[in-house]
Amino acid sequence: MAKKKNTEKRSRALEFQVTEAYKKARTNLVYSVIKKGSKKIIITSPYKSEGKTTTAVNVSIALAQQVDAKVLVIDCDLRRPTIHTFFDIKNDYGLANYLTEECTLEQAISHTENENLDIITFGAIPPNPSELLSSESMKQMVKELEDKYDYILFDTPPVNMVIDVIPIISLSDGVVLVTKHKDTTYPELNKAVDTLKRNNAKILGIIVNQIPTLETAKGGYYLYRARRSTYYRSQIY
């Protein structure tokens, strides 16, 4: 019984640390993008399975917890979309449907159980994601959404794998790169940074995922987390 209570206590403590980590990431983002009107941020990674969507979801929740802050997350990963699964929301209509004029913008927007947090799922997986994301319809959609939301987060495909993130750069105020501890290599990170800089992206910082906890170092259990959401400004590179 005592062992079970200690495990539950450690789990609660780690859960609290993770929550605080994303709140710190939120604070850094707020102070990194200081402007009037909607703030538009890309969340991407060098390669797949580095935690970018998990980060986008948790940062969006943290942002929505601010007083009177309306937040929207757009699933721009039209090749491997997963945002809807995090919120357990149906994917009847979404981004691809709206951009191909199969639904209205109101139909494409889904409300979550989190107050002030909406999402646009991917909808039908299109054969031409890059063309859709670089279309005039995409630009007009973002312009219209700016009047409705304080923060718009774009969850995009990994920057080193496909070019889909490139056309969204001009629509955003900055980019956050998500990496994975002891998985993402320096060459991979440098390649991602170079690609973003060549396309005039403002790199806001890096979030490092899956840094082992103290319990791991002692041979205990492992918890997926972003330790203090290790967030660095671009000058650190």
Image (tube, rainbow, N blue to C red):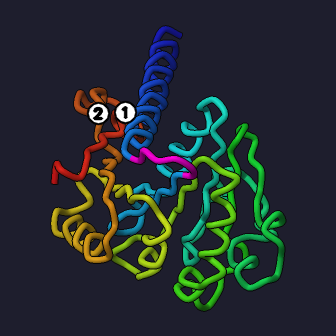
**Which is more toward the observer, 89 or 43?**
43
Q: List the single residue furthest toward the top.
A: 2
Residue at the image position 59 percent from the left and 69 percent from the top: 81
187 or 36: nearer the viewer:
36
Query: Callout 2 environment at 10 Å: few (<14), some (14 to 19), or many (20+)?
Result: few
Instruction: Name the chief secondary structure element in magenta.
Output: loop
Whether residue 207 is situated above or below residue 167 in the rendered picture: above
> Percent position (x, y) of residue 87?
69, 50
State the extent of the magenta-drawn residues as a range: 33-38
Q: Which residue corresponds to mark 2? A: 216
Query: x%, y% of residue 93?
Result: 79, 71
Q: Is residue 233 left or right of residue 224?
A: left
Question: Could you tell whether 79 is left or right of 111 in the image?
Answer: left
202 vs 111, nearest the viewer? 202
Determine the image quadrant of residue 61. top right
Identify the residue position indicated by label 1 in the image: 221
**Dot 1: within a 10 Å radius of its alpha carbon, few (fewer than 14), some, or many (20 or more) residues?**
few
**Amino acid type shown at disc 1:** Tyr
